[in-house]
Amino acid sequence: MRVCPSALRACAVTAQALRSRQKPRLLPGVTEPVSEKRPQAVFLIDEGKDVLSDITTDAVIIGAGPCGLFQVFELGLLGISAHIIDSLSIPGGQCAELYPEKPIYDIPAIPVCGAQELVDRLMKQIEPFKPTFHLGEEVVEFARREDGRFKVGTSAGTVFNAGTVVIAAGVGSFQPRRIGIEGADVFEGTGIHYRVKNSSHFHGKRLVIFGGGDSALDWVLELAPKAHSVTLVHRRPEFRAAPASVAKMRDLVSAGQMKHFEGLPHALITEGDVLQGVHIKLKDGESHALDADHVLVFFGLSPKLGPIAQWGLELEKKALKVDTEKFQTSLPGVFAIGDINTYPGKKKLILSGFHEAALAAFAIQHHLFPQKKQFLQYTTTSPIMHQRLGVPD
Ligand code: FAD
């Protein structure tokens, strides 16, 4: 691996620590609030921004959902280390983002497992292989190099020179749902924000925050003491956010330290090219003007196949066609596992993705080292696998 050393720093982060949003703070390269809980597993997080040269690696995995995480494990058993990229700021894909609290009943040998628990277990399982995570970065560029290797580039400017690529992108990269009012795109990143890159940017400012989930409430609580004013607007009385956060928000409203309205965004208030506020439509249909220097929108995320569809790989109904021996796409050296792929009989289940990851790992090993003889070894009895796993013989 060839990396500018200053671009990498050891960061102790677990899925749990990354996911918890009780006390927002920013990690380098991570744009969503994460907690300061004591981490249990150590991984390298690449800040990505000031990489001077390409990162050369055997394998890049696009997508840190359950299948991408298990791909790290299967590659690790074969002695292949991987870089793993996700546009989300947390690992776990749909499990972590869409249904972390829900139980899963069809993971072999685990009668019941919370979706976030599954992600935490996978993170623990891949710990010996020390993958490098690049979170909060969308893969936007992909090309086959003349030497048969691959160029993979992210939205943060990180560039990889990869021997193989595994696309484990699920239903696509999760993108923030937009506010959906006229002219909003013009102010995106200046007056209207879907992510918080630097919270100090909002200190002393008049803020209107839309949303009723954890992200909206976490930022309300974080910014209320530091902003000039905070107004929360949510479309209905019930919140999806943690009840404790909602209770704290209501306390702040009662103490006159912030405002809360039930309503929907209606129109922007602008003066020239400066955002001055936003009109909201209240429940009774009345329009109400709110002054704002910045509008923060947390309407959740929706998946988008996005750039992957443009990479020239054979598609069928928005999924990547693969064979069932190697789970290789139409481009040799590029593999696809999990929800993103399709083949006769495909079932979009986590256990299918785990099987696909195991077979893809052998195919990847063969692609990288065609002369190497392949043996099927059991983790129970293989000394080399014990060494890689860091367990005694
Ligand atoms: P995902 O989990 O979708 O992860 C893909 C990751 O790739 C995402 O994090 C995404 O941000 C990232 N990504 C995509 N494109 C890019 C890009 N260009 N750059 C960077 N990152 C990118 N399955 C079961 O087996 N059992 C169940 O009980 C079950 N229950 C479910 C309940 C619900 C409510 C839902 C929604 C799904 C359920 N599933 C269940 C399905 C299961 O969650 C999926 O099959 C599984 O998440 C697929 O894993 P994956 O790793 O392929 O993709």
Image: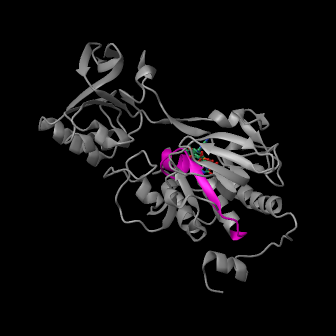
Residue 167 place in picture, x, y as percent:
69, 47
Direction from residue 178 to residue 360 in the image, left or right:
right
Q: Quadrant of the N terminus?
A: bottom right
- For the question of whether residue 64 can be seen, the reply is no
Residue 21 place in picture, x, y as percent:
36, 50
Compare residues 371 and 321 and report the one nearer the observer.
371
- For the question of whether residue 190 can be seen, the reply is yes
Q: Does the magenta stretch include residue 37?
A: no
Query: For the point 51% across and 62% down, which residue is it?
Result: 44
Check the image and report above or below for 187 versus 249: above
Quadrant assignment, res 70:
bottom right
Residue 337 place in picture, x, y as percent:
71, 50
Compare residues 383 and 120 and report the one nearer the observer.
383
Check the image and report above or below for 210 versus 9: above
Quadrant assignment, res 357:
bottom right
Q: Which residue lies furthest to the left in this view?
A: 255
Direction from residue 231 to residue 192 in the image, left or right:
right
Check the image and report above or below for 316 versus 89: above
Q: In which quarter of the image is the C terminus?
A: bottom right
Residue 386 place in picture, x, y as percent:
66, 80
Write down the region rendered in magenta. Answer: 77-97
Compare residues 11 and 343 and report the one nearer the observer.
11
Q: What colouring does the structure picture have?
A: one colour
Query: For the point 74% across and 32% down, which residue is it?
Result: 317
Q: Residue furthest bottom?
A: 393
Check the image and report above or below for 188 versus 361: above
